[in-house]
Amino acid sequence: MPSLKDLKNRIASVKATQKITKAMKMVAAAKLRRAQEAAEAARPYSQRMAAVLDNIAQAVGADDAAPRLMTGTGRDDTHLLIVCTAERGLCGGFNSQIARFARDHVRKLLAQGKTVKIICVGKKGFDILRREFASLIIDRVDLREVRKIGFENADRIGHKVIELFERGEFDVCTLFYSEFKSVISQVPTSQQLIPASAGPVAAERDSASAIYEYEPDAAAILTDLIPRNISVQIFRALLENVAGEMGAKMSAMDNATRNAGEMINKLTLNYNRQRQAQITKELIEIISGAEAL
Amino acid sequence: MVMADSFNFELVSPERLLLSAQVTEVVIPATEGEMTVMANHAPTMTTVKPGVVTVKMADGKSERFAVFGGFADILPAGCTLLAESAVHVDELDSTVLENRIAAVRAELEGAGDEKKTRLEQFIAELTKLGEVVIPA
């Protein structure tokens, strides 16, 4: 049975923790709003990019002029996985969800006898995947110092990936991140980057939009466009991740605050009961002392 | 003189939508030479080199943006410029530009021949952009 003083200390400590989790929740809420705005602001670019790419891909068609980034190497022996997670913990199952999703994928590929290479973006994913696949991780990108993710960060990763591809280090590249559905729901998602899928080609497109003049020619634009599209996709994934991380952190901290509140109630009840018991005991002692006289 | 027809012009960078407005005329620094886009232009798609985009608004005002590469999608009904990165000329200063040039220079070290030519061209374009935009 803890003493009265112990209980008092316990309550004070839980109260302090509650203050911290409450503050973290509010910080996460503020950051979430900003992250959502950033994700929304980035949307027009990626949408237009997808539309334009679709258009050009159709113009170039199955032509031999299509760049290798689009057609792939024709093999799928070596897979490159880019796993994007958060840099910090304390956000519920957010990081482990992505890591688990990626891990299942790696296991499946390994079982099929493929070679797997991993690039980790974010410290947490690296920490988890390192346990099992330390030898497969070829690189990690640290974004801890980055306060607000800019396009340059994504662009740098994109360049790295393309460089690896040009050196023939892999055949298929897949991006793992968490899709931001809502504040309470983030879904781990994978997306194939290379070979770039042109998306479902709509057969019944109006032909008016297809007659374009290209300057320089379509293939040259496509060569210029695809690397850029890869960076854009990574950028989008990173932004979604930030929003998801903040959403997960907010609900995790909200839960923690609520738990702390419950604990404080329980401890306070206990404390009061014991105090009362002690007073009663003291009274009994005094009364029985007086009676004995 | 009859007022020129206006069309919708959008300038988008990966981070945000910079401008979406009715304009009468846009000058785009396309890779194969500057091009002026007016309403009812033939559908064209072109890559863009670093340079200044001059936009003439429907109300007669004119705005200038510095873009650092990208591409433009031109349709009779409108024009969209997807810039790798873009800023309003008023917000651009020489340190930003110098940083960019320094970054490209760093990349130049140890780059392959073909890439080297491309990067050198990029530096030249950036330097020229600086001369145009920033009064000495």
Image: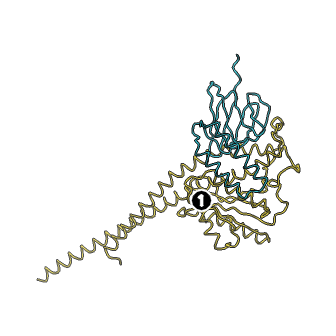
Chain colours: A yellow, B cyan
Q: How many marks?
A: 1
Residue furthest to the bottom: A292
Compared with residue A23, is residue B127 higher up or lower down, i.e. above or below? above
Residue B111 percent location from the top left of the image: 74, 57
Looking at the picture, tell me which residue is in the foreground, A250 or B136. Answer: B136
The residue located at (73%, 60%) in the rendering is A174
The residue located at (88%, 49%) in the rendering is A63
Residue A113 percent location from the top left of the image: 80, 71
Residue B130 percent location from the top left of the image: 64, 40
Within 10 Å of disc 1 (Cα), the crowding (few <14, some 14-19, many 20+) is some
Left of A32 or right of it: where is A157? right
Res. A218 image quadrant: top right
Q: Is residue A207 visible?
A: yes
Res. A97 image quadrant: bottom right
Looking at the picture, tell me which residue is in the foreground, B61 or A29. Answer: B61
Compared with residue B39, is residue A142 higher up or lower down, i.e. above or below? below
Residue A127 percent location from the top left of the image: 60, 69
Left of A95 or right of it: where is A211? right
Which chain letter goes with mark 1?
A
The residue type indicated by label 1 comes to Leu
Compared with residue A170, is residue A56 higher up or lower down, i.e. above or below? above
Left of A34 or right of it: where is B23? right
Residue furthest to the front: B136
- The residue at which mark 1 appears reads as A143
Res. A262 image quadrant: bottom left
Regarding mark 1 in the picture, which secondary structure is present there? loop
Tell me the quarter of the image containing the C terminus of chain A: bottom left
Residue furthest to the top: B1
Looking at the picture, tell me which residue is in the foreground, A64 or A48. Answer: A64
Tell me the quarter of the image containing the N terminus of chain A: bottom left
Q: Is residue A192 visible?
A: no
